[in-house]
Image: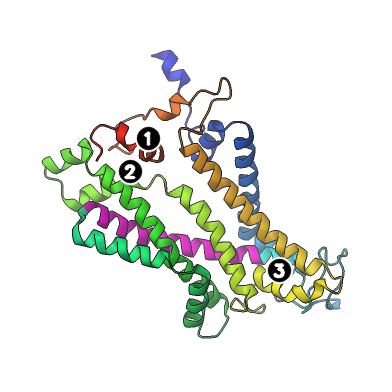
Amino acid sequence: MATTASARPSLFQRLPVISQVRSSVGLQRGMLIAGLLLTGIFVLTAIFAPLLAPYGFAQLRDDDGAFGALQEPSAAHLLGTTTGGYDVLSRLIWGARTALYVIVVAVIASIVVGVALGLIAGYFGGWLDRILVVVADALYSFPSLLLAIVVAIVVSGGQSSMWGGILAAALSITVIFIPQYLRVTRAEVVRIKSEPFVESARVIGASHARIMTRHVLRNSTRTLPLIITLNASEAILTLAALGFLGFGIEPTAAAEWGYDLNRAVSDVTSGIWWTALFPGLAIVLSVMGLTLVGESLNDLADPRLRRRAAGGEPAEDLLAPEGDPGSGDGDTDLAEASATPMTKEGTV
């Protein structure tokens, strides 16, 4: 017993990020760490934007006078100034906060609505399930960027305010993301509701609401972090596309990378490289970081892709679930369970 207890990972080692890094090997670990570093820089920059930015996102002058348009990178302006006379570095930093706002609003709204609908559809089934699946398929077929433009016009009313632009982008992304969360949650609920611990809860007289929230919901949402990271990168691209096409946020309302990139296109032909290079790099690096994290987590969730560093054998300690699946404890990985559904007794 002492040997088993000592071999069990500590609480720190079982934290989500730490456990995933420990489970990865070779190139996969390098991709995960690189993605975490890029994502961490993006998030920390957004959170501490007021402390990191040398100027405001719409500031045009300081005590020494106006900044001046298209100033080359210098000690006063490390990344130069834009056509409008804004400090490039400051707008990059404040733009990270705008992007983070859109990600948080869009992902939270998508999870709340999509998971709730998927839980109801998968648990009760019947005609309600069929209607929700058809509606989800119809929404998923809409071009996301076209829908984002329409919603941006409807929500903001032609006024590109900060929260108007953020809500327009977030709501359009939410409508596209809801079907993904609905279908993933529904598939897990359909599988889990036939498990013995759910049947036992029904036998002892537990209500549908208690079974859905306490037993089914907590075991059907463990694969969502894989989707969240990928959706977050798509949210950044959608916001940047809106700004680039002129449906984003005005520079006096908030900083937005897509708008700055649009304004800098004409500068490139004149040899002015700094106004377009840095907003483009910000979009690429932030999206790359989130995508690397999402793809790495997706690979680690697949038992066929997880290998030990020595010998290349499957990580059996990660494949074996610990604890009762209905208790919410242990390290049961529902992603790998759904990858091999016919091997679990009682699965339909």
Residue 23 in magenta stretch: no
Q: Which residue is mark 2?
A: 219
Split into 4 quadrants, where in the image is the N terminus? Answer: top left
Residue 121 in magenta stretch: yes
> Marks 1/3: CA distance?
43 Å
Q: Kindly state the secondary structure of the residue where label 3 is placed.
A: helix
The answer, for residue 159, to whether it is visible in the render is: yes
Q: Which residue is mark 3?
A: 91
The picture quadrant where one finds residue 266 is: bottom right
The answer, for residue 57, to whether it is visible in the render is: no
In the image, what residue type sits under mark 3?
Arg
> Marks 2/3: CA distance?
42 Å
The residue at the point 32 percent across, 30 percent down is 323
The residue at the point 47 percent across, 64 percent down is 106
In the image, what residue type sits under mark 2?
Asn
Point out residue 183 in the picture as x, y percentages from the top left corner.
Answer: 35, 55
User: Which residues, given as a range, are shown in magenta?
Assistant: 95-123
The picture quadrant where one finds residue 200 is: top left
- First-in-chain label (1 vs 3): 3
